[in-house]
Amino acid sequence: VQLQASGGGLVQSGGSLRLSCAASGSIFRINTMGWYRQAPGKQRELVAALTSGGSTNYTDSVKGRFTISRDNAKMTVHLQMNSLKPEDTAVYYCNADLTYYSGSYLRRESDSWGQGTQVTVSS
């Protein structure tokens, strides 16, 4: 199972970026997918998460600016980031709680991570 993140970059304050994370492998079901971020000298924090049932969870600082969505057929989650601020600068990581095939068994990986993608917002 792999999570491949894309879409980071450099943008001016007030601009927008869209992050995507595609899951691949012998996946039976994706339970929850989300995005975390880690700024220099800070702990990694949850930015947004989306369950298979459609429930969302956003950290307070991004509410109203970021939107998480998923394409179940493509096993992809997107994070649309609008009105970006310099304090949004961080490495963003995709995370998934998923169930996958392992031989004839189903196994759960509750904490699968993709590689980080850098988001830099200039003032």
Image (tube, rainbow, N blue to C red):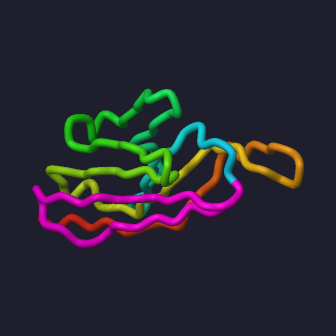
Image position of 109 (left or right of 117): right
Residue under the image location 21 percent in, 42 percent down: 65
Q: Residue furthest front?
A: 73
In the foreground, 86 or 75: 75
Q: Residue 70, how many percent across, how many down?
A: 42, 45
Residue under the image location 39 percent in, 59 percent down: 20
Q: Which corner quadrant holds the N terminus?
A: bottom right
In the foreground, 93 or 72: 72
> Which range is magenta?
1-26
Image position of 86 (left or right of 93): left
Residue 113 figure quarter: bottom right
Residue under the image location 24 percent in, 60 percent down: 17
In the foreground, 31 or 10: 31
Q: Residue 92, how many percent across, how many down?
A: 42, 59
Residue 18 belongs to magenta span: yes
Residue 97 belongs to magenta span: no
Q: Is residue 24 above or below residue 28?
A: below
Q: Which corner quadrant holds the C terminus?
A: bottom left
Residue under the image location 50 percent in, 59 percent down: 22
Question: Chief secondary structure of the magenta span?
Answer: strand
Q: Residue 109, how many percent across, how many down?
A: 72, 47
Q: Residue furthest bottom?
A: 10
